[in-house]
Image (tube, coloured by chain):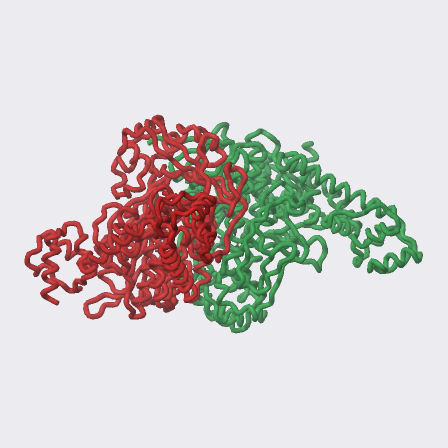
Chain colours: A red, B green
Amino acid sequence: MSVYTEQFDVIVIGAGHAGCEAALASARAGCTTLVLTPNLDRIGFMPCNPSIGGPAKGHLVREVDALGGEMGRAIDRTAIQIRMLNTSKGPAVQAPRAQADKMLYPMAMKEALERQPRLTLRQEAVTDIELVTAGGRHRVQAVRTDAGNRYLAGAVVVTAGTFLRGRMIAGEWRAAGGRAGDPAATALSASLSDLGIRLRRLKTGTPPRIDARSIDFSKAEVQTGSDRPLWFSFDGAQGRIERLELPPLPIYPGITDGWRVQMPCYLIHTNPATHDIIAANIDRAPMFNGTIQAVGTRYCPSIEDKIVRFRDKPSHGLFLEPEGWRTTEVYVQGANTSLPQDVQLAFLRTIPALAEATITRYGYAVEYDAIDSSELTRTLAARRVDGLFFAGQVCGTSGYEEAAGQGIVAGLNAACFTQGAEPLVLRRDQSYIGVMIDDLTTQEFVEPYRMLTSRAEHRLLLRCDNAEARLSDIAYRFGLISRERWEAVQAESRIITETLARLAAHHLSMNPRTAEALERAGLPPLARNQTALDYLRRPEVRYEALASVLEALGADSLSVPSRLAERIEVEARYEAYIEKELARVERIRHLEERPIPDGIDYTALAGLRNEAREKLARFRPATLGQASRIAGVTPGDVAVLMVHLERGA
Amino acid sequence: MSVYTEQFDVIVIGAGHAGCEAALASARAGCTTLVLTPNLDRIGFMPCNPSIGGPAKGHLVREVDALGGEMGRAIDRTAIQIRMLNTSKGPAVQAPRAQADKMLYPMAMKEALERQPRLTLRQEAVTDIELVTAGGRHRVQAVRTDAGNRYLAGAVVVTAGTFLRGRMIAGEWRAAGGRAGDPAATALSASLSDLGIRLRRLKTGTPPRIDARSIDFSKAEVQTGSDRPLWFSFDGAQGRIERLELPPLPIYPGITDGWRVQMPCYLIHTNPATHDIIAANIDRAPMFNGTIQAVGTRYCPSIEDKIVRFRDKPSHGLFLEPEGWRTTEVYVQGANTSLPQDVQLAFLRTIPALAEATITRYGYAVEYDAIDSSELTRTLAARRVDGLFFAGQVCGTSGYEEAAGQGIVAGLNAACFTQGAEPLVLRRDQSYIGVMIDDLTTQEFVEPYRMLTSRAEHRLLLRCDNAEARLSDIAYRFGLISRERWEAVQAESRIITETLARLAAHHLSMNPRTAEALERAGLPPLARNQTALDYLRRPEVRYEALASVLEALGADSLSVPSRLAERIEVEARYEAYIEKELARVERIRHLEERPIPDGIDYTALAGLRNEAREKLARFRPATLGQASRIAGVTPGDVAVLMVHLERGA
Ligand SMILES: Cc1cc2nc3c(=O)[nH]c(=O)nc-3n(C[C@H](O)[C@H](O)[C@H](O)COP(=O)(O)OP(=O)(O)OC[C@H]3O[C@@H](n4cnc5c(N)ncnc54)[C@H](O)[C@@H]3O)c2cc1C
Ligand SMILES: Cc1cc2nc3c(=O)[nH]c(=O)nc-3n(C[C@H](O)[C@H](O)[C@H](O)COP(=O)(O)OP(=O)(O)OC[C@H]3O[C@@H](n4cnc5c(N)ncnc54)[C@H](O)[C@@H]3O)c2cc1C
């Protein structure tokens, strides 16, 4: 039997949200890149909610986009609804969220991969990862596929999602599988075990889908999309993407047609009858009767979990979300469950809008293997095997956006590895992606990790509106964005700086002409003489209105693109906080970035507590900052370490 | 463990091309209908060529459409190219053929199912069919699913395609599966065996898909779509469908934008080098080294089969067909193969346009169980089990269109069965569908059955252009089309009849005014005085031009919709042949429709040859016509049977 062989710089295993970004980043960074996946029709597929973004997740998407990634463009091209969440809260936690057409989103993602130079797609599942050993270190050499082919590679990125020994469960039903419609990856999981990589068992779940025709929408509250343009991607904001849209089915009340056609979502609520049914069947819930042992994420709990944990809450909100322009299937957000199928139907039907609901797909949970976080370095490389990288759900996270954020880093670092170049490490004060990867490689999570704004201590710096400003230098340096784009971002930053300077230089005096101009623009009167910048800090003052007043008073044109107007307001209003935050970052930078040599022998290091010694040996932090965040390492231990490093220096 | 149960009139197992039409027909005929399928994202999926139609297949689609089916509408909505084939040949073999967008076609089909009243979709795989037995007859009662649910039904239609114990093969590689990306249906196959239903093993295959960017299109011959409007569906022709289209990728040369945007296909050719590579590796071809024992269809041979069977042919044509608006994946029509993957790449690369070709998916064959044709009656019911119906690839056919044609009959007859109504049996002189089902239930095919125009002895009557005229009475009677639509078809038929009569009544004389009018319209001069109808019989005379001449000469308006103009030409030109054909049908009708009583005991019937006795007992023909077509039954045997029936009568 002859074996077909081919050589690539980088091989990406899997084409989910992590795999797609990993492959694009690797190819954009100049590597010949092969993507292997068992079904080319399911590239970038959304097995759960066909939705992207929201707080922290939307931030990740903006960062992926700033790094030249595809997720932002794909959702901008295929959204059926986009909204800004948390508009009543501070700028740090505001984030866009969109519903995607579940069929068009993967089509857009596949197209991006197909059109990427140096990137090859092939429909095969990987069964084995082959190593070579030299000087006591293992290094990846090739992968083998179910089709019997062997592909040589300088680096391999594993992004197998929920597929490693995946098992699906609902009530008494269980079946092997990575998700409904896809088989589990059993051989690959075994191959990783064979490499000595520690695996752990996690779980996630999905709600039932129901038939729109069986919903009484008059008993639900309509939520429409944003009435002003909103984009995840830089290209979208610049009017440089081609939208993939279809005419919406006329069966959904509340479709809007403004800056783009948008479909509505619908809010409904559980009630005591719902809770009673779930409580009465809790012994049939796999999460509670011992069938599911793996741990799910607390931040995306199943409905049975919510009922048990918050016994006193009489009602939970659920959202009904259409799955696309041309389908009657509706996703029930908030009702993720692995209860038996009869119970799923019964509890949904207690809700007035769903009294006649018909289920098209039942909810289920999936249990799968993920690698233990101590196996990862902060470049998303495997500790034990050179040239092996991981990203996405296999690293113990949950969520498309988390997967995409890791994908871009792992793919780029795989490319850097083969090129002998310095890897990319994103800092915590620079990006949510940096926070996530740092958390992943310093913390022991018993449940899947989900991004939250509260995890980012510098979140005022890590806003959606400034993602490009934060990351495009890096993106350009690593070849992930074009020179034109980088220059466009620079130009935008210049506009902001200059405009803020002009506002600071413009003095508004309490005279009748100014008062009249302000009044005419609907702006509040001056309380004292002040600069235009100080005046803009008042929350009721919008930049565009102010600019028109200043122009009326004789200033040169101050008009800027509307997304920059918002950024100017934020920078003006939060300047003091932002500066304080930057100063704090500066203060801890010394500690944060102080490198710890790779070979350090913690057993020989006097003064460390035993627990600290063990944890440090396990996670092998790359910096003092990382060491300080490891649970079980106290400030005292960090001090001991610091003294040791000073001595060594 | 409690079992969730629900009751439906009809259950359809599978949502491929047969299942979709079966379910729609059943629901349209008034039955509550449940479709069970393991993956709702793969409804109406095209595992092989994303194309519909062509000779005989296009006829089937036109008939499915005339019977109220969905295939014609779905392809009209999602075609990326439509052409009329065989335009240089007679009207009987002309047929439309279209390329579909591989992702949008299933989306359109799913939408049709979702919007059909009384029809419920549910994502579950059937593992068992349950019977009740009464009076020595078995009858279906329920199905059980992998999810543990039990669904009661009055009738069940099995449309499991290539999934029954499906096994995929390419070279030395093999894997269980119904097709790439989908698991096999092993339990269901066993359940059918348990019911005593004889199964046989068949095979089919698919070619590799290649990356458009690796093709040198300058070395291929561009084939563009029809430059005049062309529709499969009545609704399309009436301007009553909503097209689902996306802007095409700009990478394909030859995109046209006329009555609709269309993508091109490309013709290339194999050469001796191609054939040498295949011949040199023929011992590694599963079809030739004994790995594949099942039989494939002769009319869609694998490339290795073509090379072996037609050794002297120096070249075979292949078509490169884009798989959709937004993908670089290209289907290689004519290169269906189960050769090893290295050989697939090597032989493709011998073709100049493919010298640098990259494969995205390898070709493979699939072996599967199909039911033995002697298990079927001509209503597509199982002989052994009441209320059980079959349609599509499971019946031993090959092709989407064949599947759809059976689907509509099986679904409708399942509905009739639960309603206690007379079933639908389509005659051979009425439709290709009738020919196909008659063939299927009277012939022993060792290979998958594919529709060909040569199988239809009355093909001049069974044209694409008159499908509605042939079938809409039936469609309307069974509730498959609306009264409006039926009336519209009637109105069209009336226009044709009246127009032909007016043409027959209009005498053209050889005078200067007429001569000048004909010349001005670019029509040939009269050779003698004749009716306009006779003049129209000349092949170079187009109806529209003639009508304009007659109007210029003072006739009332003769303008008709353009598709009717073509039908008028055909009816005029082929009137003599058509009438002869109708007379022949009339002559044999007596024999053809003579019923044979169900319980007839062939062993007791003196004068029959032994072989005939055995074959008649096996196929149990419903009519003398059917008996006459059974291989092994001679005209002498038919005479014996006829005498017996006369006596009995
Ligand atoms: C049932 C279910 C419920 C979920 N619920 C939630 C939720 O509530 N909230 C949430 O945030 N997230 C949820 N998710 C998780 C979400 O799907 C993932 O976070 C996201 O898809 C992760 O992206 P990924 O790229 O890591 O993995 P995936 O998107 O799973 O992609 C994995 C890829 O690897 C491929 N692959 C697998 N094995 C092999 C192999 N051997 N060789 C080659 N390719 C292989 C697969 O085909 C696929 O392309 C859910 C997932 C599932 C399945
Ligand atoms: C690899 C391959 C190559 C082919 N090549 C050709 C070709 O060259 N020429 C040609 O004319 N045709 C070809 N075909 C055949 C073509 O795909 C079929 O003719 C057509 O799809 C038949 O339609 P169907 O509805 O009978 O079956 P399918 O389209 O196969 O649909 C079967 C349906 O049944 C469902 N199903 C299966 N098991 C169960 C279960 N237990 N419970 C519930 N649902 C179930 C499946 O999910 C699917 O929805 C090929 C098919 C394959 C797979």
Question: What residue is at 28 percent from the left and 59 percent from the top?
Answer: A426
Q: In this view, does B572 lie to the left or right of A109?
A: right
Residue B384 at x, y = what percent? Answer: 51, 37
Q: Which of B380 and A216 is in front in this view?
A: A216
Residue A538 at x, y = what percent? Answer: 36, 45
Compared to residue B589, the image places residue B58 above or below, namely below
Q: Is residue B366 left or right of residue B424?
A: left
Spot the residue most to the bottom: B273
How many circles with numbers are drawn on the protein? 0
Q: Quadrant of residue B441?
A: top right
Q: Is residue A310 left or right of residue B529?
A: left
Compared to residue A350, the image places residue B124 above or below, namely below
Residue B204 at x, y = what percent? Answer: 50, 55
Q: In which quarter of the image is the C terminus of chain A?
A: bottom left
Q: Which of B234 and A298 is in front in this view?
A: A298
Decide if residue B636 is in sight here: no
Spot the residue most to the left: A606
Q: In which quarter of the image is residue B241?
A: top right
Compared to residue A151, the image places residue A466 above or below, namely above
Q: In which quarter of the image is the N terminus of chain A?
A: bottom left
Q: Is residue A87 left or right of residue B432?
A: left
Spot the residue most to the right: B511
Decide if residue A87 is in sight here: yes
Residue A302 at x, y = what percent? Answer: 32, 38
